[in-house]
């Protein structure tokens, strides 16, 4: 299957669709998931276009991993987490719903489960507060 440039993350990358962006560099952006599985659920989205891991350029993949690590440290600190869960789906059969490569970065707490994937939309005020907490943690890193 080929990359569809009209996907929602391409529109967020181009600035044609809004998002709570917490980080940007030459390689990727990081935004809050609008249906978070836990508070602070962040998506790292490489700027390089691919549907998912399977068709991604290996060089682009190697460049995005340090961004994932940076965001993992930030959400870990911002939400006083006990751990950080990284997840990434490839094609619909594996649970992928948006077809531009992205990595889920989810702060986790001991004994606390997460909500379903693509569950309920979070309140905008809550997302704004969480985005600021992550930006503050990045600024202190
Ligand atoms: P996937 O299923 O493709 O791995 O994950 C896509 C994620 O994007 C889901 O967790 C879903 O909640 C999130 N999502 C879907 N549409 C939007 C959107 O318009 N904005 C943001 N920020 N997240 C979205």
Image (cartoon, grey):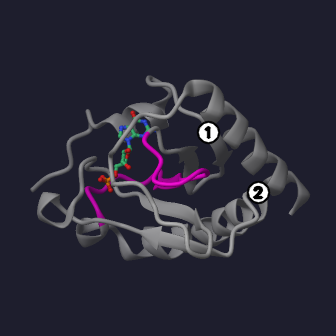
Residue at image coords 54%, 67%: 112
Q: Residues within 10 Å of mark 1 (few under 14, many from 20)?
A: many
**In the image: residue 57, left or right of residue 130:** left
| In-front residue for pair 5/121 | 121
| In-front residue for pair 25/122 | 122
| In-front residue for pair 71/46 | 71
Residue 127: image quadrant is: top right
Tell me the quadrant of ligand 1. top left
In the image, residue 86 sits, relative to residue 117, either above or below, namely below
Which quadrant of the figure contains the C terminus? bottom right
| In-front residue for pair 5/87 | 87
**In the image: residue 8, left or right of residue 68:** left
**In the image: residue 134, left or right of residue 96:** right
Helix, strand or loop at mark 1: strand
Using the numbered discs, state the Cα–Cα distance from disc 2 to disc 1 in whole angstroms.
15 Å
Residue 94: image quadrant is: bottom left
Indicate whether residue 47 is drawn in magenta.
Answer: yes
x then y, percent, for residue 25: 65, 51
Residue occupied by mark 1: 21
Residue at image coords 56%, 44%: 31
Helix, strand or loop at mark 2: helix
Indicate whether residue 45 is drawn in magenta.
Answer: yes
Residue occupied by mark 2: 78
Magenta part of the chain: 35-52
Marks 2/1 in contact by CB < 8 Å: the verdict is: no
Earlier in the chain: of badge 2 and badge 1, it is 1
In the image, residue 12 sits, relative to residue 28, either above or below, namely above
In the image, residue 13 sits, relative to residue 73, either above or below, namely above
């Amino acid at each position: 299957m080929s990359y569809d440039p009209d996907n929602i993350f391409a529109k967020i990358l181009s600035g044609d669709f809004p998002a709570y962006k917490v980080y940007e560099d030459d390689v990727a952006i990081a935004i809050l998931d609008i249906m978070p599985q836990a508070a602070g659920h962040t998506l790292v989205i490489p700027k390089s276009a691919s549907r998912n891991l399977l068709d991604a350029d290996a060089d682009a993949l190697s460049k995005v991993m340090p961004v994932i690590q940076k965001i993992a440290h930030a959400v870990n600190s911002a939400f006083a987490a006990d751990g950080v869960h990284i997840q990434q789906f490839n094609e619909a059969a594996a649970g992928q719903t948006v077809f531009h490569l992205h990595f889920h970065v989810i702060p986790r707490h001991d004994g606390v489960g997460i909500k379903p994937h693509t569950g309920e939309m979070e309140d905008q005020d809550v997302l704004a507060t969480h985005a600021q907490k992550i930006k503050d943690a990045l600024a202190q890193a």
